[in-house]
Amino acid sequence: MNKLDVDVAVIGTGTAGMTAYRAAKAQGARTVVIESGVYGTTCARVGCMPSKLLIAASEAAHAMQHSGPFGVHAGEVRIDGPAVMERVKRERDRFVGFVLEGVDNIPDEDKLRGHARFTGPRTLVVDGHTEIHAARIVIATGSTPLRLPQLENVGPGIVTSDDVFYWDDLPRSVAVIGTGVIGLELGQALHRLGVRVKFYARGGSIAHITDPEVLRAAGRVLNEELDIQFQSKVVRAVQEGDEVALTVSDAMGKENTERFQYVLMAAGRTPNVHDIGLEHTGLERGEDGIPHFDARTMQCGNSHIFIAGDANNERPLLHDAADHGKIAGDNAGRYPDVRPGLRRTPIAVAFTEPNIATLGKNYRTLCEGGRRKFAIGKVSFENQGRSRVMLQNKGLLRVYGEYGTRLFLGAEMIGPRAEHLAHTLSWAAQMRLTVDQMLEMPFYHPVIEEGVRTALRDLAHCLTEGESDTDAADSEPGT
């Protein structure tokens, strides 16, 4: 067996792993990266980029099919499934190619192929061919789609989001299990491309929404277009020829069986931490198997081990994975000089139509600890000027502010072009602007952002009304 001594070993070459490698190298550390699968990040290969390609195709189809109210009639719309999927895969491969160029730039002596497992706090064995002694280790093993036990070993009709982007044609029908971001994005896109789609959700959640009013608005808006069955439980599935007979029970326990060409498991992703020998590290772990870590430093306990990206399941998004990797790599490279790194204001977007977005401190976080200590402003997009002009006047925005300081804390929304509204508001949250300072900013006319101003005006009024009976010194959300 080959033996290797290094300063830093990084397990995984996704966004977090590649960033950690570069950061550790920049600190002057002798660093290696280990990869057991194909090179190419989750985002580029089976995540954010190919999904947006599918969504873009669906938006084109939807626009052509719904141009009548503008007085524009496009005629019969024909969707060429093989052509749609050919472009998705071609452009996906282009994005993956950019990532592979980065991997190619890593010196061969810094790359190892194989599955890494801990055999001790500072030792790793890679596929039985190499033993690594590493002074510091970064776990950046990513995640995989969650698989439901009821759908295991059924047949080829059971797929995950990773499989969708290898299809050669659009399917006839798909059952989507889950109403998280992945399920909603893919399911709505397929629906708009002519696929019969039905959603099943175990509970009543939608994407990352925690605000009950926004959640109700989202359910109402999405159900106008999509067939979503909430409070549903998958009972069993049977492969019957080229279809899957899926049996689901509703909230009353009544079972119903329906056939689909594919059943798409989109109930979340699982961090890849369960087959890397963490039991040999001595790290304290949670019930989910993830080591306890400091979100400011990515350090696991007080150890020489760091964890970054989807593997730590904190905020499994690409921009956060990159930040995680930078912090973990910097700290692994200069250990034991461990320092807090830059953590940005949380922001998450589901590219459904309308977009769903959350940023800053969400409703659930702000309500922790009992009595509510924040005010809420809101705006409906139903009568918002620019939204009506575009016939995209659906959704709700709720914004949160702190009593006393009048700091802007965060927002949740479903609305037109919310991906852009969320960025504007997240910058304000990161700059710790007050609601009054935000209202001093320019707002052009007519733009959707005028709806943000309406919500902020409502929030400013609620903050003023509530300050008389609120002890500002008892406020905590903005600290």
Image (cartoon, rainbow, N blue to C red):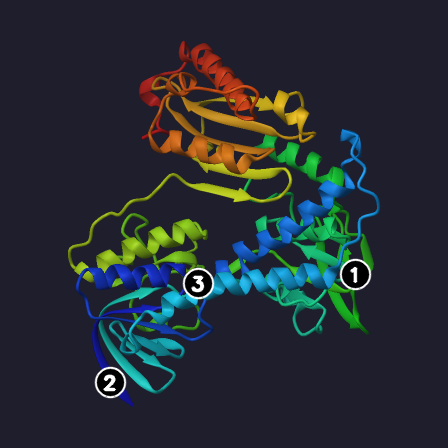
Dividing the picture into quadrants, the one containing residue 261 is bottom right
Disc 1 marks which residue?
A: 172
- Badge 1: few (under 14), some or many (20 or more) residues near its Cα, within 10 Å? some
Residue at 60% from the left image edge and 64% from the top image edge: 89
Left or right: 126 in relation to 161 = left
Q: Are marks 3 and 2 in contact (CB under 8 Å)?
A: no
Name the foreground residue: 60 vs 39. Answer: 60
Report, in whole angstroms, how far the alpha carbon at label 3 lies from the one at label 2: 32 Å
* Residue 306 at least partly seen: no
> Mark 3 vs mark 2: which is more N-terminal?
2
Element at badge 1?
loop
> Mark 1 vs mark 2: which is more N-terminal?
2
Name the foreground residue: 157 vs 111. Answer: 111
* Residue 96 at least partly seen: yes
Percent x, y of residue 452: 51, 24
Quadrant where the N terminus is found in the figure: bottom left
Instruction: Check disc 3 and give the amino acid type.
Output: Phe
Instruction: Check disc 2 and give the amino acid type.
Output: Lys
Percent x, y of residue 119: 31, 78
Report, in whole angstroms, how far the alpha carbon at label 1 lies from the one at label 3: 33 Å
Disc 2 marks which residue?
A: 3
Disc 3 marks which residue?
A: 98
Element at badge 2?
strand
Percent x, y of residue 262: 73, 64
Left or right: 126 in relation to 368 = left
Name the foreground residue: 3 vs 118. Answer: 3
Residue at 70% from the left image edge and 34% from the top image edge: 220
Tell me: residue 464, above or below residue 174. above
